[in-house]
């Protein structure tokens, strides 16, 4: 089994900012979500924990490791797991984007995950950088990363396609359980209002 975990809520999530490669902290709620994800992974066989290099992912991975008696010094930081670079939109709110780049936001709405952020990346770029990692993920691994990266992995593994991708709701600290690189289930972090 492979467990793909979206990091806990970040301060940028709270502020409605598209933080991408901007390094932001977990919120207090995000720390509680990470704890819940750790509890949800108990009784699973975990031999490896991989994490994006961004603090919100590493801190989520550390909390998960503590809940599962996994030495946090053995967390493997994997550069390819970093979130999409939003380019000119990096660390902006939607309203700020609309105000300064109306035409580009319209293109983004139209193209969705096929859009490439000016001076940044698109999902095809994420797929290129993460594909070798995905192909070599050992079984019994937890992978803590970001929404865009998880979606890109789903596209790469043919779990989702252009039509179905947005039907998968992936909230902070939800866990996608992959069995032979096919989705088995999604363990929801926390019912609304419990964290």
Image (spheres, rainbow, N blue to C red):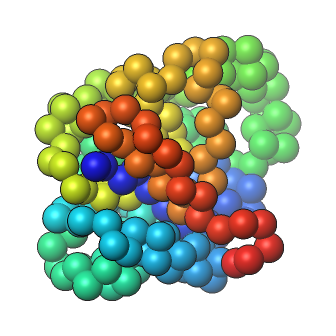
**Who is closer to the viewer here, 5 or 129?**
5
Which quadrant of the figure has residue 191?
A: bottom right
Q: Is residue 6 left or right of residue 18?
A: left
Task: Please name the residue shown 25% across and 29% down the image.
Answer: 131
Residue 173 location, x and y as percent? 54, 62
- Quarter of the picture containing the C terminus is bottom right
Is 1 above or below relative to 106? below
Task: Please name the residue shown 36% across and 23% down the image.
Answer: 156
Residue 145 in view here? no
Is 67 above or below relative to 2? below
Task: Please name the residue shown 49% across and 61% down the image.
Answer: 7
**Who is closer to the viewer here, 122 or 44?**
44
Q: Is residue 138 left or right of residue 174?
A: left
Q: Is residue 95 left or right of residue 93?
A: right
Residue 5 location, x and y as percent? 44, 56
**Who is closer to the viewer here, 193 or 115?**
193
Task: Please name the residue shown 75% across and 22% down the image.
Answer: 109
Residue 18 location, x and y as percent? 64, 48
Residue 4 location, x and y as percent? 40, 50
Is 64 above or below relative to 101? below
């Amino acid at each position: 089994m492979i467990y793909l975990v979206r990091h806990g809520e970040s301060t940028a999530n709270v502020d409605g900012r598209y933080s991408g490669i901007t390094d932001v902290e977990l919120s207090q709620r995000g720390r509680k979500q990470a704890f819940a994800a750790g509890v949800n992974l108990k009784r699973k066989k975990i031999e490896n924990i991989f994490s994006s290099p961004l603090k919100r992912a590493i801190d989520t991975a550390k909390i998960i490791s503590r809940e599962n008696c996994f030495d946090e010094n053995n967390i493997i930081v994997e550069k390819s797991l970093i979130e999409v670079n939003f380019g000119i939109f990096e660390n902006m709110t939607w309203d700020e984007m609309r105000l300064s780049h109306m035409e580009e936001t319209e293109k983004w709405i139209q193209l969705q995950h096929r859009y490439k952020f000016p001076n940044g990346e698109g999902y095809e770029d994420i797929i290129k950088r993460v594909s070798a990692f995905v192909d070599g993920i050992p079984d019994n691994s937890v992978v803590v990363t970001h929404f865009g990266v998880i979606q890109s992995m789903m596209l790469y593994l043919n779990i989702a396609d252009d039509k179905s991708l947005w039907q998968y709701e992936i909230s902070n600290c939800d866990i996608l359980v992959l069995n032979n690189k096919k989705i088995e289930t999604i363990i929801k972090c926390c019912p609304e209002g419990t964290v």
